[in-house]
Amino acid sequence: FKEFQKIGEKYGPFDIAFIDTGAYNQAWATVHMMPEESVQASIDLNAKVYFPIGW
């Protein structure tokens, strides 16, 4: 999802990013990010601290 990179370039860097990390099964990939995707999102957002969250 390249929009995170666009957001990071326009509004970053961010002190902290709270990012959904709830998919541990490919069946959930359409509604949650896999852990590696949320890590990449924090990098793309240029976040100083990454805080994974799940509901």
Image: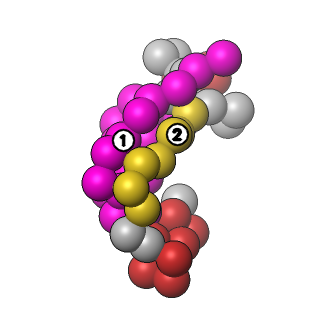
Which residue occupies 51% across, 83% down?
Answer: 10
Q: What secondary structure is found at the residue carrying circle 2?
A: strand
Q: What secondary structure is found at the residue carrying circle 1?
A: strand
Q: Examine the structure image and report whether residue 50 is included in the region drawn in magenta.
A: yes
Quadrant position of residue 9: bottom left
Q: Name the residue type under label 1.
A: Tyr
Q: 45 or 36, which lies in front? A: 45
Quadrant position of residue 45: bottom left
Q: Residue 42 placed where, x, y %?
A: 39, 51
- Left or right: where does residue 15 sit relative to residue 27? left
Which residue occupies 52% across, 39% down?
Answer: 19
Q: Residue 43 placed where, x, y %?
A: 32, 57
Q: Quarter of the image containing the C terminus?
A: top right
Q: Name the residue type under label 2.
A: Ile
Label 2: few (<14), some or many (≥20) within 10 Å?
A: some
Q: CA separation, marks 1 and 2?
A: 7 Å
Location of mark 2 (residue): 19
Q: 16 or 29, which lies in front? A: 16
Location of mark 1 (residue): 50
- Left or right: where does residue 46 sit relative to residue 19? left
Q: Examine the structure image and report whether residue 48 is included in the region drawn in magenta.
A: yes
Q: 23 or 50, which lies in front? A: 50
Q: Residue 53 placed where, x, y %?
A: 53, 26
Whether residue 55 is visible to the viewer of this picture, yes or no, is yes
Point out which mark residue 36 bears.
none
Boundaries of the magenta span: 33-55
Tags 1 and 2 touching, CB below 8 Å: yes
